[in-house]
Image: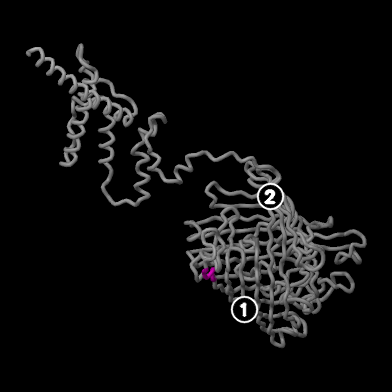
Amino acid sequence: MTCAITAGSGSRNYWLRVASAGVGICLSVISAAWCQSPSPTPAGEPPSAGEDPRDAKLRELEARLAHTERKLSLREKKQPPQPDKELPPEDEDSGLVATALAQPDQPRTDTERMELPGSLFSEFDQQPDQFRTDTGQFRTDTERMEAVPPPAINQTFPTHKITGFLQLDSAWYSQDRLNQAIVGDAQDGTGFRRARLAVLGKVAPLTLYQIEVDFAAAGRPSFFDNYVEQEALPILGAVRAGQYLQPFSVDAMSGFRNLPFLERSLPFLAFVPFRRVGVMASNNTEDERTYWAYSGFKTGGFNNAPMGDSQFATDIGDVGGYSFSTRMTHLLMYDGDQCLWHVGAAYDFSSLGANDAVGSGTAGNAGGGPHAFYQAKTTPEFGPLGQVQNSQSFGSAVNFTPAFVDTGRYAANYFNLVGLETVFQNGPFSFQSEWMLTDVNSVVGPIIYHGAYAECLYRLTGEARGYDKKLGALKNVVPKHDFISFGRDKSGEMGMGAWELAGRVSYVELRNPNSLSGHYYDSTTNLYNAPASKGAVGNGTLTDTTLGLTWFVNAHAKFQFNWIHAFLNNSSPGAVHGFSQADLFVTRVQVDF
């Protein structure tokens, strides 16, 4: 009986010990999976001889659980935890709880809460993958995607992209009688101001090219922006060779697609050498707040015209004809496109050129050889719909907007052109202004011309105009909501597009001194011997006020309307001169791709 009782008691103890051992094993497995490595026996408590190791493990887990409960109790009482000598040396569970409880107890968005565990579980993220828990659930999808290295892209060269745009203009004129008598009877009309196709791309990672042709100008297609460019050169930055916009004026560098009015300002139209054939270097500071460029190019253009576009990218003649132009801009204030203040200055020196080949037909070729010439002229701020370079004489308005002021063509050697510019933008409001002065070294000494403009723009729908820091220039407006959206996320959604109001005042003064009489070009004799009464009939001052409204249907299409009121004060010594006025009502439909 005694033996049986002893045996039964031993049997019960045995099964209790087995159950305890099973619980210990389960807890050990859970602890190993959580802590990612089994904890060693606490120092100073080696298992006694003959003791079941499972009992030692169970005792260890109970000690760790008791320690965690004490720390939680202390946290609830807002008391700092006391050191516990019985704490196992690798207590990762208690560290996890302490870290979690130490987080600030304040409202957080779902995104903030999802981002926090990235540091909270950093210890576990550093463990081997086979012991990782599903901590990926605590990272956003973007973070998980960024953690994966992008696939290697094997780009082949050369690359190409086809782009282009067209501008269809219409104009209606209203002139007083004196204005018609001075400049001619301007005819209403419709025509394509520009219709261009371009191919651009790379022939190597840092070697760019562009080939662009315009089909709107009468005659053969004209060249616009045809060049090759090498980027990231030491000190120089980007170096471009070919036909391109010369670095002068923010109005010029902002691009035809991005004009808030149908045409650029009067000073630009009168003074600026635009596209020419040459070599240019440009660069930016590291923060891209400062931009500079400098260019050497051939002065003349088609028929050696010193201003406007070199439409055929051809310049022939060994009499002078070389120029240098530079421009620098800086952002005094920049908080994205929403708030910026841009200032800049530009300078151009141009040695006037001529073709002295026998039979070239160059002005002055009859008797004594040709002579380089200077001539500046401009229409009101609406472009001609025909051959700009081959325009008729002053006072004629056969097929497009006539010139309202004209210096006449006279013998000269070179000219200096300086310009100052500023752009300020605050949200949907922007202000832009420039001033230019030209000093011409003529055969009778220096002659000074000058002009300026100021314009204000306001987007009724709240958009800010984009700014290109790499060029110190302005971009087109991108509507917040397209009129009809075809985007993947907003297909079929209807909006207002973007609406912009614009106002501009500009002037240019082209008056010659009386001493220049007798040095104007006479087309009948092909000599520079004409009097002022024949060569200076377009002298005077032109002031334009323009009001504009633009509807941006989307980022690639817009409709524009401008009302231009032109004040002309013609001061020529001819029989017909004086103060006259004209109104131009002009529209444009533009699409680009």
**349 sits to left or right of 355:** left
Q: Going by the picture, which residue comes out furthest to the left? A: 2
Q: CA distance from mark 2 to mark 1?
A: 39 Å
Where the C terminus falls, by quadrant? bottom right
Give the answer, above or below, for where 279 lies relative to 516.
Answer: above
Q: Which x, y percent locates residue 394?
A: 78, 76
**Element under label 2?**
strand
Which of the two discs, 2 and 1, sits closer to the camera?
2
Give the answer, above or below, for where 331 lies relative to 265.
Answer: above
**448 sits to left or right of 472:** right
Residue 444 visible, this angle:
no
Where the N terminus falls, by quadrant? top left
Tell me the number on the disc at residue 201: 2
**Which of 555/310 is in front?**
555
Three-letter code, disc 2 = Gly
Q: Is most of the magenta stretch helix, strand or loop?
A: loop
**Element under label 1?**
strand
**Which of 179/588 is in front?**
588
Residue depicted at x 52% and y 68%? 494
> Which segment is the magenta one?
494-499
Instruction: Give the quarter of the image for residue 41.
Output: top left
Tell me the number on the disc at residue 354: none
Q: Which residue is mark 1?
A: 563
Q: Which x, y percent locates residue 198?
A: 71, 57
**196 sits to left or right of 493:** right
Q: Within the magenta stretch, is there residue 495?
A: yes
Give the answer, above or below, for where 199 lies relative to 103.
Answer: below
Instruction: Give the quarter of the image for residue 382.
Output: bottom right
